[in-house]
Image (cartoon, rainbow, N blue to C red):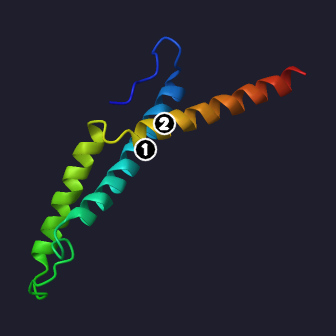
Amino acid sequence: MIAALSSASATPDVAARHGKLVDAAQQFEAVFLQQMLKSTAPDGQEQGAGQDDSGGGSQTYSSFGTEAVAKAIASAGGLGVARQIVRQVEHAAAGRASAENLSTQR
């Protein structure tokens, strides 16, 4: 899981933004994993090849299964993509904050 901010130094606004960032990063990683899992499915399984096009239910069912697996993997730490996104965005935000502090002190 992605490490939370220290509660001693985080204001509610910062903690809320961090939570939203973590959620968005995990959603991104879940979509990324879903696409990877779809590409590893046996030929035609995700696309519904060789299936009767009249129903389409099995294709939808398979897609839901892939999506659920991808979300579970991402929420459990996944490949570390979400963690890296959070680290990079927070690092960039800290850099901007430092630059703004320096410019207002002059």
Identify which residue is drawn at 25% across, 59% down: 37
Q: Is residue 21 above or below residue 60?
A: above
Q: Secondary structure at mark 2?
A: helix
In the rendered view of the protein, which quadrant contains the C terminus?
A: top right
Answer with left or right where residue 8 lies relative to residue 98.
left
Q: Residues within 10 Å of mark 2 (few under 14, many from 20)?
A: many
Answer with left or right where residue 12 lies relative to residue 65.
right
1 and 2 marks in contact (CB < 8 Å): yes
Which amino acid type corresponds to the residue marked 1 in the rendered image?
Ala
Which residue occupies the foreground of this view, 19 or 41?
41
Whichever of labels 1 and 2 marks the residue nearer the N terminus, that label is: 1
In 3D space, how far apart are the residues under numbered discs 1 and 2 (Cα atoms)? 7 Å
Identify which residue is drawn at 60% across, 31% down: 91
Which residue occupies the foreground of this view, 7 or 44?
44
In the rendered view of the protein, which quadrant contains the N terminus?
A: top left
Percent x, y of residue 87? 51, 33
Q: Which mark is residue 86?
A: 2
**Number of numbered discs present?**
2
Identify which residue is drawn at 11% across, 88% down: 54
Percent x, y of residue 81? 41, 43
Residue hosting label 1: 25
Q: Secondary structure at mark 1?
A: helix
Which amino acid type corresponds to the residue marked 2 in the rendered image?
Val
Hey, which quadrant is residue 20 in on the image? Answer: top left
Hey, which quadrant is residue 25 in on the image? Answer: top left
